[in-house]
Image (cartoon, rainbow, N blue to C red):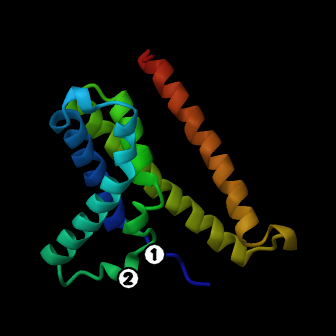
């Protein structure tokens, strides 16, 4: 079983897309347009931003094997990671520095999750695992535990920073 590719360029594109879309929604959309329907623009514009940034990366760096390392689809806005990160960044970030930090840590957290899940997949292939846990069930359990850990770390960080 081969290792899944590490989507470094896609993580970088996710970071840039969240940051650029936060700036677009924060500064270019007038306040009177920011109503309930405003959030429905997050997904389609996230998809467009991911597709545009991927094409820009392919144009700027034509010799890099960009297509070989794809894990996420830009058409789905990287499986919904960009719109969710954008929504949380839009709600939590008050200034550009806050959006920069949140966008970076969303991208770093997704990269960490991909690394951990790749290692779990590799180790499960090499070691004895009960038949009913092989493959996707083990990954789903691992993702649940990862979400609990990341939520706990986030809550502790907010408590340490005394953020509300």
In percent of width and height, residue 141 lies at: 72, 55
Residue occupying the point 32% across, 45% down: 104
Secondary structure found at label 2: helix
In percent of width and height, residue 25 lies at: 24, 39
Residue occupying the point 39% across, 77% down: 69
Pick whichever, 159 or 25, lies toward us. Answer: 25
Q: Is residue 106 visible?
A: no
The residue to which callout 2 is attached is 68
Dot label at residue 5: 1
Q: Residues within 10 Å of mark 1 (few under 14, many from 20)?
A: few
In percent of width and height, residue 103 lies at: 33, 43
Secondary structure found at label 1: loop
Pick whichever, 104 or 33, lies toward us. Answer: 33
Quadrant of residue 57 within the rendered picture: bottom left
Pick whichever, 31 or 77, lies toward us. Answer: 31
User: Do labels 2 and 1 touch, CB within 8 Å?
Assistant: yes
Pick whichever, 132 or 112, lies toward us. Answer: 132
Left or right: where does residue 83 sit relative to residue 132?
A: left
Q: Residues within 10 Å of mark 2 (few under 14, many from 20)?
A: few
Residue occupying the point 51% across, 32% down: 154
Residue occupying the point 40% across, 49% down: 83
Q: Tell me how far mark 2 sits from mark 1, CA to CA.
A: 8 Å
Task: Give the mark, 2 or 1, whose residue is nearer the N terminus.
Answer: 1
Report the quarter where the N terminus lies: bottom right
């Amino acid at each position: 079983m081969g290792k899944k590719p590490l989507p470094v360029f896609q993580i970088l594109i996710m970071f840039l897309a969240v940051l650029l879309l936060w700036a677009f929604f924060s500064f270019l959309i007038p306040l009177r347009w920011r109503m309930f329907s405003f959030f429905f623009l997050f997904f389609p514009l996230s998809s467009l931003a991911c597709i545009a940034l991927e094409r820009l990366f392919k144009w700027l760096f034509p010799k890099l094997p960009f297509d070989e390392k794809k894990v996420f689809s830009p058409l789905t806005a990287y499986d919904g990671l960009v719109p969710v990160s954008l929504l949380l960044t839009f709600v939590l970030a008050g200034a550009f520095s806050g959006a920069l930090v949140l966008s970076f840590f969303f991208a770093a957290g997704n990269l960490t999750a991909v690394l951990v899940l790749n290692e779990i997949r590799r180790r499960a292939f090499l070691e004895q695992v009960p038949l009913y846990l092989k493959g996707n069930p083990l990954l789903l359990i691992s993702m649940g535990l990862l979400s609990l850990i990341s939520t706990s770390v986030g809550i502790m960080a907010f408590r340490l920073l005394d953020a509300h």
